[in-house]
Image (cartoon, rainbow, N blue to C red):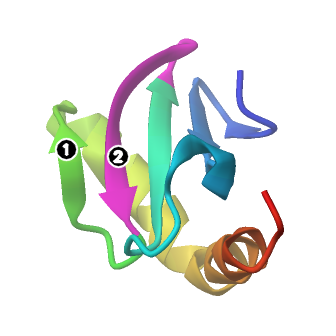
Amino acid sequence: MPKYSFLKYGIEIRPNEHNHKGQMAHIHIYIHGEEVGSMFLNGELRDGKLKSKDMKIVRQYVLENADELQALWNEYQNSAY
């Protein structure tokens, strides 16, 4: 389960050892520990499928925390992995 989780949901920003260097900032979404998709920090679904209720909750969290998530993304992009 990702480090940053809330309710039944989990989100993860994967560091660049997962080949994310140079990509647009996004988070991976988990529901009950299972990956269901990913979302850009502007709230757009990148891939996967979520129920509308789940999408609303995750999108609200991402939008409210976009600055912090972007800072983490930038830190990973600048790391030496």
- From the image, tell me which residue sits under label 1: 47
Looking at the image, which residue sits at the far front?
A: 80
Tell me which residue sits at (30%, 53%) in the image. Answer: 56
Camera-side residue: 58 or 22? 22
Camera-side residue: 69 or 21? 21
Q: Secondary structure at mark 1?
A: strand
What's the magenta region? 31-40
- From the image, tell me which residue sits under label 2: 38
Residue 39 lies, in percent from the top left, at: 34, 56
Which of the 4 image quadrants contains residue 37?
top left
Task: Tell how many labels.
Answer: 2
Horizontal side of 5 relative to 52 (left or right) equals right
Which of the 4 image quadrants contains residue 68?
bottom right
Residue 34 lies, in percent from the top left, at: 47, 13
Horizontal side of 69 relative to 38 (left or right) equals right
Q: Main secondary structure of the magenta part?
A: strand
Residue 76 lies, in percent from the top left, at: 74, 68
Q: CA distance from mark 1 to mark 2?
A: 5 Å
Q: Find out whether residue 39 is within the magenta segment.
A: yes
